Amino acid sequence: MANNNKSASHVSIDTTSFPNARAMALSAGDINQAVRRRVGDILTANRNNILKAFPQGLKELVDMGAISANESQTLSKILKLIIDVDRDRADPEDAFLAIRTLYHELIVDQRSTPVALAIAGVASSSFSLEKNSPLKVNKIAGAGGAIAGAVTGAGIGFGIGGPIGGAIGGVIGGAVGATVGLCG
């Protein structure tokens, strides 16, 4: 039997063959803390102005290849709708329906990235539905923060684990951002 000088207890993983290996090694708590810190830094740098912070985050996602320029435009439209509802400039039901339409357009487009889908999904879930006749749609406090967190988390997750890491980071970031939005 030939000795190949490799320890039986050591397994080498080629991360170029498994680009998401890093993402699998990190816990959701680690990503949560990183996203929380990054969301706070971006909001502080933009004087807690989400309208300034959001385009910066989208540009970073486009620059790293996590989303396309077209997806950035769609996500900007979605954010504007959420901010308008948050500031009582738009009807929640109309905004919800418009956001859902934009989200569904991303869903059926096979070129849509996991990161854009995660961010749009967070936005689509930023409304509370009540069973009434007719259906009542309410805004949820912290929705703007959820979107900012989703964008930030997507960037961090994409850097860690590629497209799937970006999608996971977007979802975790949305939850963190909503919490920050509710508390801030």
Image: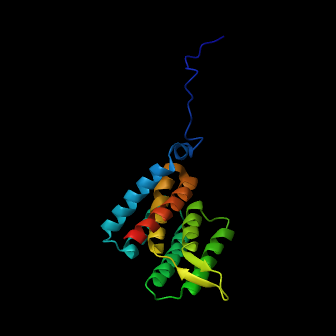
Q: Nearer the viewer, residue 156 or 74?
A: 156
The answer to whether residue 165 is above or below residue 72 is: above
- Position of residue 123 in the picture relative to residue 32 (left or right): right
Q: Nearer the viewer, residue 36 or 63?
A: 36
The residue shown at (55%, 30%) is: 12
Which quadrant, please, contains the C terminus? bottom left
The residue shown at (61%, 82%) is: 97
The residue shown at (57%, 28%) is: 11
- Position of residue 172 in the picture relative to residue 37 (left or right): right
Residue 5 picture quarter: top right
Tell how many labels. 0
The answer to whether residue 147 is above or below residue 138 is: above
Q: Position of residue 70 (x, y in %)?
A: 55, 71
Which quadrant, please, contains the N terminus? top right
Residue 38 picture quarter: bottom left
Q: Position of residue 144 (x, y in %)?
A: 45, 74
The answer to whether residue 184 is above or below residue 114 is: below
**Is residue 10 in view from this perspective?**
yes
Q: How is the image coloured?
A: rainbow
Q: Nearer the viewer, residue 116 or 170?
A: 170
The residue shown at (58%, 85%) is: 93
Q: Position of residue 2 (x, y in %)?
A: 63, 12
**Is residue 63 in view from this perspective?**
no
Q: Position of residue 56 (x, y in %)?
A: 40, 68
Determine the residue located farthest toward the top in the rendered image: 1
